[in-house]
Image (cartoon, rainbow, N blue to C red):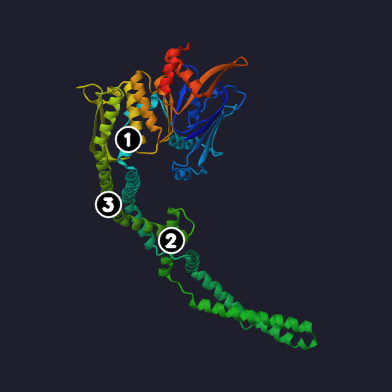
Amino acid sequence: MLTQLTIKNYALIDELQVSFNNGLTIITGETGAGKSILLGGLSLILGKRADISNVKDASKKCVVEAVFDIAKYDLKSLFLTEDLDYESLTIIRREILPSGKSRAFINDTPVNLDSLQVLGAQLLDIHSQHQTLQLTDDSFQFQIIDALAKNATVLATYSDTLKTYKSLQIELEELQEQKASAIKELDYNAFLLKELEDAKLISGELEGLESEYETLNNVEVIKEKLSHAHQLLSDENIGVATQLTEIKNQLAKLTSFGKQYDGIYQRVNSTLIELDDVFAEIEDVEGHLEADPNRLEFVNTKLQTIHNLMQKHTVDSVDDLIEIKDSLSLKISVTENLDADISDKEKEIRNLESELKSIAKTIHDNRNKIIPELIQQLETILATLGMPNARFFIELQASKTFLSNGTDDLQFLFSANKGGQFNDLKKAASGGELSRIMLAIKSILSAHTQLPTIMFDEIDTGVSGEISNKMAGIMQLMSKSMQVFTITHLPQIAAKGDTHFKVYKEDIDERTQTQLKKLTQEERIVEIAQMLGGTNVSNSALEHAKQLLN
């Protein structure tokens, strides 16, 4: 419930702070006194966009702050979803800065307007002409029926299941698209894969093949040079090995003359050992070196294949080609497995579809059971509100489509006159009749669900005195289980309130300001008397006012 409202620097309000109680609160005042300003301020709390033109003094900050007691509203999960700190006394504040920028806070946490609207819808329901038009919306009509049918839990299950169902449908479509695309690419990918597989690629083989190619391609030149080197090393007269052996023998005779001669000897000896190894390796290589045209052709062909593949796939190594081969292999195997995946997904969807139909039938059955009771209650209440011939025709028709709230299409028809044709509400009911229908619906809902604080904005427009008395009785009954505000011009309704506030204008320092005052019992008598007989209050009007209040 709304426990306190503070408005600063808004429209004709300089500063206003007022506290509210539970029950039925009446707000009265002359036309133009500023009741719409009060509603405008509350609309900011509900997330309406701010307008700098509504700020009284554009050089100062405008603030609207409301305190709500939400201990009984079961909103902890909503606060958790919106990432807000839960407080049983929750404070919502809107600020309009001189720059025109607007800020919103819930329990001092900055929030965007979306969060404000989500929470505001759970706390305060301002019933205006705009909201009366909600009656003509299917979604609102379903809300009425589902509230009475106690469908909240099963609707939540249906919504979660439908979400999963739609998600699976999207996944199936993606798989089918993948399959269609894969089929187009399959032949080409298979061709590319076969090319790479036929190449029999081995990681790191390119360098070895290139070296082998150079050897095989130049085998005669290599053999000639090795043979010449072998001759230079091994010739008995002028061979390097022969000459170095003679040098070694001569130096061996000097080793006893000092360390430096021994060092030279050792170095020559080491060189000779290394030269012997070189000689042996030259002999070995020369002995195994043979021309092999077949092997040369094979190596050359494979090198050409590798280079062509690298150029084709724009890569720089055999490892990159192997990676592409593995990737193509995976793509082809995935393509081959898509049929199985699609089949599994279709089975999941069929199972969920069956589950959705079952849940939707439960929703449908619950609705069908409650519709006669809803019609009877609506027609009974409207009869007391001066519409004795009001009749409703409410019917559910099966749809093959899974809608957001089941599989029902709804006909919610109305006839205001005896023997009249049933028609859509917006065509069959006048504005005044729609207001009374809305009041009847709100009163029924208040007995079946936890409604937020409701504020009726002149719902009694165009209503006679006796009917207004019945309307006031309905609002009184509603106020037993919830906080109800009503802005009214009718004394019969004003007299039924537990608390009475008056909106009025006064001039302070040559500036007109809107004020809101809680009336005492005596002040209520005078206010209601003025509503009955005008500004000049007569004794009979005062007596009539006392009778209404009693």
Q: Which residue is mark 3?
A: 351
Measuring from the top left, give residue 110's x and y in whole percent. 55, 38
Quarter occupied by residue 444: top left
User: How many callouts does the rendering have?
Assistant: 3
Residue type at mark 1: give it. Ile
Q: Which label is found at residue 322?
A: 2
**Image point 40% across, 65% down: which residue?**
200
Q: CA distance from mark 3 to mark 2?
A: 43 Å
Q: Is 271 or 402 nearer to us in this picture?
A: 402
Residue 38: x %, y % from top left: 50, 25
Q: Earlier in the sequence, mark 3 or mark 2?
A: 2
Q: Residues within 10 Å of mark 1 (few under 14, many from 20)?
A: some
Per the model, the C-alpha gap separating discs 3 and 1 is 31 Å
Q: Is residue 44 above or below residue 299?
A: above
Point out residue 233 in the picture as x, y percentages from the top left corner: 61, 79
Disc 3 secondary structure class: helix
